[in-house]
Image (cartoon, rainbow, N blue to C red):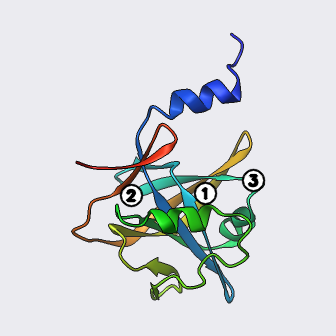
Amino acid sequence: MTPISSARFRTLLGSFASGVTVVTTRVRDAAAGMTATAVASVSLDPPLLLVCVDRDSDFHAAITRATAFAVNVLADDQERLSRQFADAALPDRLTGVPHQTDVHGLPLLDGAAAHIVCRLRETYDAGDHTIVVGEVVDGMTFPKAPLLHFRGGYRRLQ
């Protein structure tokens, strides 16, 4: 079988609603973050999740050199943050973003629906992306509805 075009693939996967997250990390004194919808649970025992990171993104170097990262599940009123962390033209996407720093030095965004803290466990090459697997070591949920992405746009639960 011949693979479909990337445009058709994007259209098909756009029919799969996904939560919107900002993945953050810290390498030495530099914090970094990016918007990600390609996040999924992998295993309950041990508790593992994955994040897919484009190899051409500036965040790729940061997360593959880090020892830990955080997945900030965005709340439905945080579309602006999603857009800010997706903007590759911004050199420091955390500027002006209210956040706390956890005991590992990871930025945890204020107002998120959840924070999931992971120790970097493995990375795998996958086409033009790297699959980053993290072992969940901490986290917290908050009473907020999530921001969703569906068919090329942001959505909220009704």
Q: CA distance from mark 2 to mark 3?
A: 25 Å
Q: CA distance from mark 1 to mark 2?
A: 13 Å
Q: Position of residue 109 (x, y in %)?
A: 44, 77
Q: Which amino acid, mark 3?
A: Arg
- Residue drawn at (69%, 19%) of the image: 3
| SS of the residue under disc 2 | loop
| SS of the residue under disc 1 | strand
Residue 34 visible somewhere in the drawing = no
Write down the residue under mark 2.
47
Q: CA distance from mark 1 to mark 3?
A: 15 Å
Cβ atoms at labels 2 and 3 below 8 Å apart: no
Q: Is residue 9 left or right of residue 46?
A: right
Instruction: Give whichever of discs 1 and 2 has the lower sequence position.
Output: 2
**How many marks overall?**
3
Write down the residue under mark 1.
122
Q: Which mark is residue 55?
A: 3
